Amino acid sequence: MGDQSLAEIAGNPDKEHATTAAYRVLYDGQCEVCQSCVSWLKALDQSKITCLPISAEVLSAVDSRLQMDECLRQLHVVTPGGEIHVGWDAVACLARLFPSTWLIGALGQRFPFRNAGRWLYGFVAKNRYSLSKCRGGACRVAKPEAVRRHAKLGAFWSCYTLGFFIRVPLVLWSGIRAAAQRTSIFARTYHERLDLLNGKLTILFLNGILPNTVPLLFGELFTTVLYDGIAIDPGSPKMRRSLARHLRQVKPRITKVVATHAHEEHVGNLNWLSGVTGAPIYVSEMTARFLTPFKKLPWVRATIIGQPPNLRQPYHLLGETIDTESGYLQVIPTPGHCDDHIALYDPKEKVLLAGDAFMGSYFATPNPDVDSRKWLLSLERLMKLDIDILVEGHGHIHTLRADIPDFPAVVIRQDPKVAIGQKLDYLRWLREQIEAGFQEGLPVRVIEASCFPWGRRTSWESCATDECIRLLSLGHFSRTELVRSFVRTDGDHLPIVYEVRISGGE
């Protein structure tokens, strides 16, 4: 059994009785050491335990003998038989449940290991409030003044670092597994195209010698979308041979070329594709300003993806709609990923061509021109649409429609509104954490750490990939930028390539 919601535990007595076959572990949901140990418990075997973050409602539902002060001070485990183990004895009790840790549990109940374990655990318990700032955990709710009075940043980093090292094997294993999955997806999509809706929607997967490092290392696929005669986001110059190969095979009728925003992997072939097909270019007014001229990219991005050329005349500015072969698409401003971003929506087919307005529910390493406050408003705007099919700009499709065939790891069987809702919940939670951190006067890196607590699977499962992105992009894409994206103002100084976003091109 894994974690259960508060409603399930406190609101349904039958649920409480149903969990008595498992060991119930009461832990602080924000303490980094607690979270790390709970992650190991879940990795070892989720059928024997139920991990419950501390709250007054949960404690009363699990066992009336449990006291908030005591549970905040030390780990508590309630056995299926109703016994309560506390502190080091609770750790030893849990260790005996699993073959790989049984020896630790057995020795931990005998002299001198039991005495040493109790002493060490007692030291941690005595310094409970200085080892974690508990922002968002039970301590913040039950003992906020004690936390503010005792919490020190040095102790916070010690706790956070210890939590990381406890979890390092899980982080490395998750990174290896994710790399294997990315390689498999890249192999399946290499030179592929996906024809949907009787040819009305086609996804062309693009490749290039250096651009291929991105899907292999980070999982971000490159695509061009063909929809009812419109070519959307035709890729970068280093993907041009791949796009040309697709066009020779498909020979589509292209009547317009559109860019959703001015990032290099979306606009580098606008002039070329327009020249090859004779189709006019359509971009938003802001995108046109960004592309005339196109600012010099950081050398890493220019080397891997390719420096786009300046947008050449003639081109047209997008209005509120754009005609297609059999109907029209609504043009919806969706700033956030960047200020000039637009999405395209077919109200007849209920298809949202989102571009990068939606990039997975837990995308955590944006570049420096992301404004997450604007992104929240854009996602709220998209939630009002009636969406059956959501097409991301980097290849993933969210839908429950039966006429969309399965394509492993590309077609995701999920209601698009659910996916957008999860993204909104995540961004709202981040906004709360970040605003609270800045109100407390915490440094950016401390706030970043509090936004990626080790108890969240999304924090440690993507840790290796996220830090690899930070390293290889020289910091342009990072978790730190995610924090900054919630607090930027129009006066912020950004790298020169992004200054045009702030100034509106003027």
Image: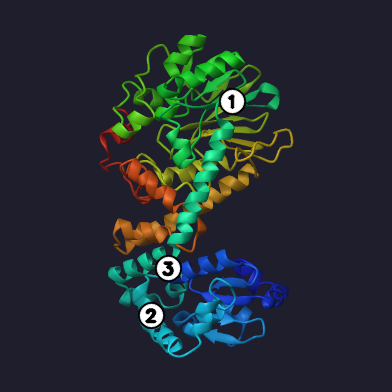
Tell me the tag on residue 329.
Answer: 1
Earlier-in-chain disc, 1 versus 3? 3
Helix, strand or loop at label 3? It is: helix
Helix, strand or loop at label 1? It is: strand
* Residue at (43, 84) in percent of width and height: 117
Q: Position of residue 12 (x, y in %)?
A: 69, 72
* Residue at (50, 8) in percent of width and height: 278
Reply above or below: 166 against 129: above
Q: Which quadrant is home to the N terminus?
A: bottom right
Closer mark to the observer between disc 2 and disc 1: 2
- Find residue 139 and report its image quarter: bottom left
Reply above or below: 230 against 108: above
Q: Position of residue 429 (x, y in %)?
A: 47, 57
Tell me the tag on residue 190.
Answer: none
Q: Amino acid at mark 3?
A: Glu
Reply above or below: 451 against 331: below
